[in-house]
Amino acid sequence: MSVFIDITGLPQERITFGLSPLAELAAALHALSEPAHHPRLHGWTTSISATFKAELAERLHEADFLWRAARADILLPAVPRGTLTEELDDLDRMADERYVAAALEISCASRYGEGAPSPLVDAGARGRALELAAARGPRQAAFVQRMLDDPPAVRAWIRRLLEECDEVFFSDTWRRVRVQLAADARHKTELLRHKGLAEALKAASPALTVEEDGLRTRIVVDKLGAGRTTAAGAALTFLPTAFGWPHLIALYAPGWQPVVQYPVPAGEPAGAASVDTVKLRLEAVAHPMRMRLCRHLARGTYTTGELADANGITAPEVSRHLAVLRKAGLLTTRRRGRYVLHQLDVSVVARLGSDFLEGMLR
């Protein structure tokens, strides 16, 4: 299972390595909302979170579906700009239908690669977005309802939230990390120019390779998720991130220019457990469907119904797989009203093996 990006006939100058303040802000917000994914950033996430006033923390929690479990496509600019303001201005020029569909893609993840219609114009897509948002809790359900009822107001609200994050912590953070990111982008650009795409991608991530098959050339993004898109006749953008490890993000939605966000070098978690425990856990995650479920559960909490919908199987089948993972001690479970939410215990998985954890979170 991988993401394939067709680049047949794409001129080398249409492949760019650049840096995006909006994409980096989104990566930082993800690290703040899921600190267990980013153990090396523990000091930073703790100190930054402590500076948030209660009102800002509440609003970030309200909108965190944009960056928590996955990354909404509106946060990965295909044409990076020099400033956050310029990138937010580009977002303002996007049509409501396109913006809302991209913002709510996390609620419709199982149809991401199909080019599903916007919830603003399709009653079925609207109902689906509301139904799946309800499983995430009343806060997200209310937020999605407001976005569907009054897109301009919610879009303005999101922009103000991101601008406030810039004022509170990100502008200082960006001044610090942009030097590293600019140096990385320059290095990859030089490799691309002098040694070719394969060498540039290898330097960016071992999970990125070039594959040629007859007359076609494509980039393979080694992820448990499956998808395909084309950059032929358009362009392809690579964005380095200082906050991204271990995630490797690929934007491949139909109608969007492909974007890949890759982490600059970072560390890895490690750990150990008894032989019997490791054996039980390895057997639990060896099943292909349970690996797919783990990929979802590593990114956030999910109900049985959501997992069934996203993976094309029945709820009873999901329950049986969850029981195996729970017996192995790999899940945490909590109840919210009539919904039972499951999540992978990332700290336990980190002790199981950093390679497995990176694969789940890539």
Image: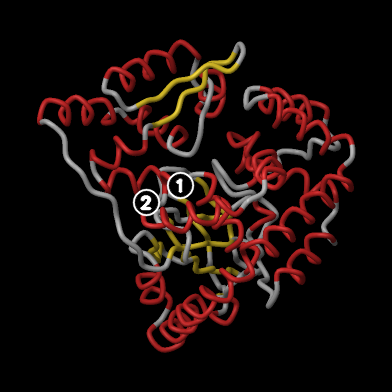
Density class for disc 2 (Cα within 10 Å; few <14, some 14-19, many ≥20) is some
Percent coordinates x, y for residue 19 in the rendering: 58, 73
- Of the pair 248 and 160, the residue shown nearer to us: 160
Specify whether 101 is left or right of 202. Answer: right
The answer to whether the residues at label 1 and label 2 have Cβ atoms under 8 Å apart is: yes
Percent coordinates x, y for residue 351 in the rendering: 24, 40
Density class for disc 1 (Cα within 10 Å; few <14, some 14-19, many ≥20) is some
Q: Label 2 amino acid?
A: Pro
Please say if 114 is above or below 278. below
Q: Quadrant of residue 352?
A: top left
For the point 16% across and 34% down, which residue is it? Answer: 273
Specify whether 255 is left or right of 177. Answer: right
- Of the pair 230 and 202, the residue shown nearer to us: 202
Residue at image mark 1:
35
How is the structure coloured here? secondary structure
For the point 50% across and 35% down, which residue is it? Answer: 300
Percent coordinates x, y for residue 339 in the rendering: 58, 15
Q: Quadrant of the N terminus?
A: top left
Q: Give me the disc on residue 39.
A: 2
For the point 41% across and 89% down, which residue is it? Answer: 194
Question: In the orientation shown, which residue stands out farthest toward the bottom?
Answer: 194
Q: Label 1 amino acid?
A: Pro
Percent coordinates x, y for residue 60 in the rendering: 66, 45
